[in-house]
Image: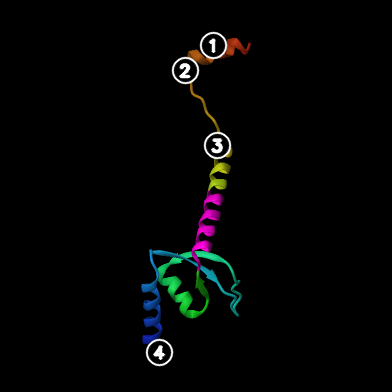
Amino acid sequence: MDLKDYYGKIREKMDELSGDYVVVVSKSTTDGGRAGVLTEVTKFVAAKMFVDGRAEIATAEQTAEYYKELRVAHEEVKAEEERGKAVVDLFSKAGFEALKKTFGLVE
């Protein structure tokens, strides 16, 4: 393939795409690529993958589902982080002494 034509096709596809990032759907490839994997990539990478026959541009429904799953995964990670946080209460020495007396921990 002529490089001028190749990069011309990539530029044409880039002009068709909106936004800086695009969700693509992978195709099965001979070198082990799995079909149906959704990934967010730059506009240039999306156009190159399309021209190379390695991916299709995701539909609006696929893109919405991808971002929904991404949000859910992000919320799960944040919730897990919150569960792992230690709670620390700080109080004065006088408050600590009063607490010790209340619970019979006086030395």
Tell whether 53 sits left or right of 19: right
Image height of 97 relative to 65, above or below: above
CA gap between label 3 and label 1 equals 27 Å
Q: Is mark 2 on a helix, strand or loop?
A: loop
Q: Which mark lies nearer to you, 2 or 3?
A: 3
Return the x and y of residue 38 as percentages of the image width and height. 54, 65
Q: Residue at x 38, y 64 (%)?
A: 20
Q: Which badge, 2 or 3, is on the more N-terminal residue?
A: 3
Farthest residue to the right: give it.
104
Name the amino acid type tagged 1.
Ala
CA gap between label 2 and label 1 equals 10 Å
Between 106 and 27, the one lying in front of the other is: 27
Mark 1 vs 4: CB contact within 8 A:
no
* Residue 98 visible in image: yes
Tell whether 9 sits left or right of 93: left
Q: Residue at x 62, y 13 (%)?
A: 103
Name the amino acid type tagged 2.
Ser
Mark 2 vs 3: CB contact within 8 A:
no
The residue under label 4 is: 2
Q: Which badge, 3 or 1, is on the more N-terminal residue?
A: 3
Name the amino acid type tagged 3.
Lys
Q: Residue at x 40, y 70 (%)?
A: 17
The residue under label 1 is: 98
The span shown in magenta is 58-74
Q: Which badge, 2 or 4, is on the more N-terminal residue?
A: 4
Marker disc for residue 85: 3
